[in-house]
Amino acid sequence: MPTTTDPHTAAGNGTAAAVPAIRFENVEKRFGDNVVLKDLNFEVAKGDRVTLIGPSGSGKTTILRLVMTLESLSDGYIYIDGEPLTHELRDGKRVARSEKAQKQIRKRIGMVFQQFNLFPNMTVLENIIEAPVHVLGQSKAEATKRAMELLESVGLPGKANAHPLQLSGGQQQRVAIARALAMDPDILLLDEVTSALDPEIVGEVLGILRHIAETTDITMLIVTHEMQFARDVSNRVMMFDGGRVVEEATPDVMFTNPQHERTQAFLHAVL
Ligand code: ADP
């Protein structure tokens, strides 16, 4: 892959030709006749924390799910660290990449979902070590050691042998965060991770994510309604409406001086 020379990707890493962590090129996503994303182009530089905001149905979750290959791309290309994710241009034709090639890239990406999505029939420990053992090929002992460290870091050292449904929502979400981190991802996708939680629990989960943001250089793509969290953690905010980016700015500018009337109306309604 040729490296990009776009100066926008150079922020923070000192090289003019840095390859973005994520690049959307002319992405289109349709569900039947419903065109959800159309001609979408954007880049996320390595180490960026980008929050996607916008009204319900504007396509934010679909973007995360496309990066995680949980949805199929209708047209266009997504590049992860410069490598085509699901489709590539070969001899002038758009062709799908092999499942093996996609899997190689996907293992560098972690996702935390609104509804936790833990395997209910497995213990907490089994949930966390499943992918490190089966996808990364770690030994069970090695994966278990790391899982115990991660459980400690999310404040659940004693819960390794519990089953997810014995835990509160906040605890399940902390397990889901530990599970994503166990893969040592380059990219972490956070999809409304506090929306299903009781209000008094939201703070503890956001606190853990703030800590991860402060202590790692993981690239993050975040969909959240927690505007204070977005402000604290992200360095860029993109406002979506109808599957398009209507405005992009730093959090300071976006939340205090939005330029686009759709952004102004949206923020007025949620803040
Ligand atoms: P947001 O995250 O901004 O609320 P979504 O990405 O969830 O928006 O949804 C964007 C649009 O795509 C909506 O119109 C939604 O109904 C549609 N959509 C999302 N997932 C599916 C699906 N699996 N099948 C059909 N339509 C879908």
Image (spheres, rainbow, N blue to C red):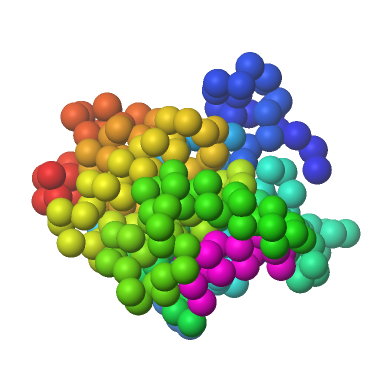
Q: Is residue 61 above or below residue 7?
A: below
Percent of width and height locating residue 100: 80, 67
**For the point 56% across and 69% down, which residue is it?**
126
Queried whether the magenta region covers residue 188, the answer comes back as: no
Tell me where residue 143 appears, x and y as whole percent: 65, 56
Q: Which residues are magenta?
A: 122-136
Looking at the image, is 53 positioned above or below residue 12?
below
Q: Residue furthest right?
A: 91
Q: Is residue 226 visible?
A: no
Tell whether position 133 is magenta.
yes
Q: Is residue 49 left or right of residue 139?
A: left
The main secondary structure of the magenta stretch is: helix
**How far from the left and from the top, in percent, is residue 98?**
80, 69
Residue at horizontal 69 percent and vertical 53 percent from the top: 142
Q: Quadrant of the C terminus?
A: top left
**Residue, x 50% and y 49% (percent of image)?**
150
Q: Nearer the viewer, residue 264 or 230?
A: 230
Q: Quadrant of the N terminus?
A: top right
Horizontal relation, residue 261 to residue 153: left or right:
left
- In this rendering, position of residue 111 left or right of residue 198: right
Question: At 15% across and 54% down in the image, what residue appears?
Answer: 200
